Image (cartoon, rainbow, N blue to C red):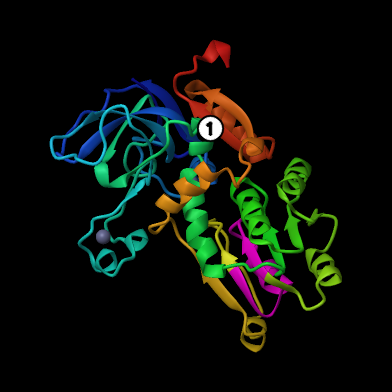
Amino acid sequence: MRAAVFEREGVLKIKEIPKPEIIRADDVIIKVELCSICGTDVHIMSVPPGYEATPGTVLGHEICGEIVEIGSAVTTVKPGDRVVLNPNDYCGTCDYCKNNYPNFCEHIRAMGIDVDGGFAEFVRTSEKTVYRISPALPARIAAFAEPLACLLNGFQKIRVMPGESAVVIGAGTIGLMFVQMMKAAGAYPIIVSDPNERKRALAKKCGADITVNPLEQSLEEVVHSQVPMGADYCAEVVGSQMRQAVNVVRKGGTVLLFGVNKKAECQIAQSRITQNEIAVRGTWLANATFPRAVRLLESGVLHLEELITHTLPLEGILEGIELMKTGEGVEILIDPCLQEENK
Ligand SMILES: [Zn+2]
Ligand SMILES: [Zn+2]
């Protein structure tokens, strides 16, 4: 089968590799319908990398597909079922797993980072990582399940209430989903900061009341002109803007740090957090939030089709990563069934 293999720093190649086979009794083999490019994939492909992946691994972790084969012990899904999957398989036996934090598992197996992922025609995973979806749910929408499950894990830490104000820093796929979620929760005003004009326009479409280009305007000033105390919440979806996030929330407000950039460090006046009683919360991966993510996608509450800017064949993946880097692409789907000529 064809697959996009991360060879070494900065090098990703489309190669013919053996199709995965059932190894363990709880394995399932999935024919990939779509796999979206995540900001993490862009960080992995940067030189030097902003996120480490294991050389030789097939990338891709936001996967939707159809089960084509199951191991002898599999009981909850069967060939023909369509599924999304949690790419972070956990061991179930370490201290974190036993304390109900599978997202912090000490032996986590991250598909598409350390274990072969979904930028391929087929992928193997364990039955315990898959979630069945309705036959009526389009793959284009189902492909959002993994980022949405991670977002919901963060969202339950802020619990935005109707009439509360929110700032979102970064308007990529996750930031735009945050905007739609906050809108659905009744937040007002929702202020979004992103230097990219296309993303700001999308943010408006998603429900942002005000958008800010941080290269031209001070986000802090705009926020305080709208909400004199400062915003109740700020979701930081970039991975390097914590200082900005802390400066836009009110006393007693909450900052949610969602974005990850391992190269970024920030200098901050710690007293601002202390004296203003600001809560700064991290959030990492999904934790029992996949079932809710699937229900939310099936409900149609979110309008995700408008975030999709490109659908490319496997061979278009480097182009897709470039489009993400330049900000021209927002949600980019890779369809392994598409042939290069008819993209
Ligand atoms: Zn991701
Ligand atoms: Zn574990």
* Image label count: 1
Q: Amino acid at mark 1?
A: Arg
In this rendering, is residue 182 above or below 133?
below
**Front residue of 90 and 206:** 206
Quick check: 69 left or right of 285?
Answer: left
Per the image, label 1 sits on a secondary structure element best described as helix
Residue projecting furthest to the bottom: 275
**Where residue 21 sits in the image (x, y, percent)?**
21, 28
Residue 312 seen anywhere in this rendered image of the structure: yes
Q: Residue at x 17, y 34 (%)?
A: 71
Residue 48 seen anywhere in this rendered image of the structure: no
In this rendering, is residue 337 above or below 149?
above
Q: Residue 230 occupies which quadrant of the picture?
A: bottom right
Q: Residue 205 occupies which quadrant of the picture?
A: top right
**Front residue of 120 and 286:** 286
**In the rendered structure, which segment of residues is drawn in magenta?**
233-255
Quick check: 126 left or right of 311?
Answer: left
Quick check: 274 left or right of 20?
Answer: right
In this rendering, is residue 264 above or below 202?
below
Task: Indicate yes or no whether the magenta region holds residue 234.
Answer: yes
Question: Which residue is tagged 1?
Answer: 140
Q: Residue 255 occupies which quadrant of the picture?
A: bottom right
Q: Residue at x 57, y 60 (%)?
A: 264
Considering the image in quadrants, where does the C terminus appear?
Answer: top right
**Where residue 199 sits in the image (x, y, percent)?**
72, 44
**Front residue of 300 and 321:** 300
